[in-house]
Image (tube, helix red, strand yellow):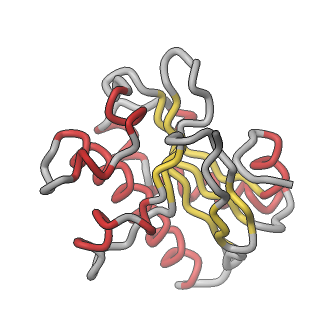
Amino acid sequence: MNAGAIVESGMSFGPYPQGHCFHIEGSRLYGRIAHGVKMAEMIVLPFAAADPPRLWIIEAKSSTPRPETQPGFDDFICEVRDKLMNGLTLLIAAWLGRHENGRDALPEIFKTTDLARADVRLVLVINGHQDAWCVPLQDALSKALHATVRTWALKRASVAVINDATARRYGLIDL
């Protein structure tokens, strides 16, 4: 059984197998802390049998400022950084039971996933972007998330900026 698709920034994410997507923005858990807290859209376990398990924390955008647009570009990168970091932090906090009923808010497969071994990806998906336009965004976002990647001992390649076509190839969005 599949969960319904989630439409964000003009893209239809999913459908994913039941329980393989935690739609953070649509959760009561996020609703209780939302004021003043920027948050990623969702967390997906796209490959159930992967070893180690893969967790994709996803932020979706329909457009981005150009790198030479200042301070707009830097502000955009900081906002995406904050959303992805907060998504990771909320997942860990919920998994640890730091919020009342927080662990219960997670789909069952997330509760049983070995987060200590998980291959975490912090992913920005941009609708309609050309591959070449993603490169400077990838560089800037990787730099902005450097401390997070180091602190959480994530892989160097854990930060990704992809367009809708690449997201489709990975099975993150529907045709």
Residue 42, compared with residue 108, is above or below; it is below
Residue 28, compared with residue 145, is above or below; it is below
x, y percent for residue 62: 71, 74
Identity of the residue drawn at 61% across and 50% down: 3
x, y percent for residue 153: 35, 30
Identity of the residue drawn at 37% across and 72% down: 38
Task: Classify the position of the N terminus by image quarter.
Answer: top right
Q: Is residue 58 left or right of residue 152?
A: right
Q: Is residue 148 left or right of residue 170?
A: left
Residue 17 occupies quadrant = top right
Q: Residue 9 versus residue 22: which sits nearer the camera?
A: 22
Residue 28, compared with residue 124, is above or below; it is below
Residue lying furthest top: 51
x, y percent for residue 115: 34, 29
Identity of the residue drawn at 52% across and 30% down: 54
x, y percent for residue 4: 64, 56
